[in-house]
Image (cartoon, grey):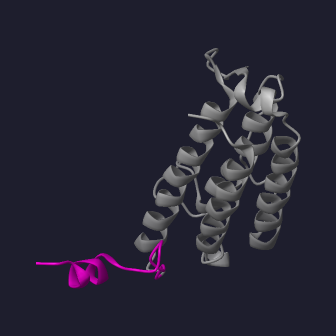
Amino acid sequence: MTPDLDAFLDYLERVHARTRRIALLIPDDHLEWSVRPGAMTLGDLVRHLAVTERLMWAETVSGRPSRYASHGCELADGKAAVLDFYDRQHAEAVAIFRALSPQAFAGPCLTPAGASMPVWKWLRALLEHEAHHRGQLYLLLSLIGVPTPPLFGLTSEDVRSRAAH
């Protein structure tokens, strides 16, 4: 596989936009709600995505150690602030990713777990991480009765009705 930074960045923007559309649906009065004490809140999940992208992935692909220390309200409090924080951290991370040379994108980095892997492969894990937590946002929103749109425009019922039998 030949790593392609522009293709990765284009896909990352679409992933970010899909997650942001779901984060916008979080009711203001449920931003810090969680299913149980000690579990991540809806706001924690959005802040977590922001800080891992910027302070873990962007740092490690730049040859620096992760600086991720928190995903709490002290980073951004209130829905507007959380969404702004999510967007700012994303923009900063993308600027760092965009500055990678082709050699750096294909070259190794050290993950927080101490594993060495190609930068492009480590950044693939960022996409999986975002999808994982977006799924949690969908689930938590459903638990509080917030309707969510289908991820790619079709519901499972739509797909079944269009399937060849």
**Along the viewing direction, whichever of 66 and 29 lies nearer the viewer:** 66
For the question of whether residue 69 can be seen, the reply is no
For the question of whether residue 108 can be seen, the reply is yes
**Along the viewing direction, whichever of 12 and 28 lies nearer the viewer:** 12
The image shows a total of numbered marks equal to 0
Please tell me in which quadrant of the rendered image residue 118 appears. top right
Q: Quadrant of the N terminus?
A: top right
Q: Residue furthest front?
A: 2
Magenta span main SS: loop
Q: Is residue 61 magenta?
A: no
| Residue at image coords 58%, 51% | 130
Q: Is residue 150 magenta?
A: yes
Find the magenta span and give its range. Answer: 147-165
Residue 119 sits above or below residue 124 on the image: above
Q: Is residue 38 left or right of residue 68?
A: left
Residue 25: x and y in percent read: 60, 78
Residue 59 sits above or below residue 127 on the image: above
Q: Quadrant of the C terminus?
A: bottom left
Residue 57: x and y in percent read: 72, 36
| Residue at image coords 70%, 61% | 13
Q: Is residue 51 left or right of residue 151?
A: right
| Residue at image coords 63%, 74% | 21
Q: Residue furthest left?
A: 165
Residue 37: x and y in percent read: 51, 50
Q: Is residue 113 left or right of residue 160?
A: right
Residue 22 sits above or below residue 12 on the image: below
**Along the viewing direction, whichever of 65 and 121 lies nearer the viewer:** 121
Please tell me in which quadrant of the rendered image residue 122 appears. top right
| Residue at image coords 65%, 37% | 3
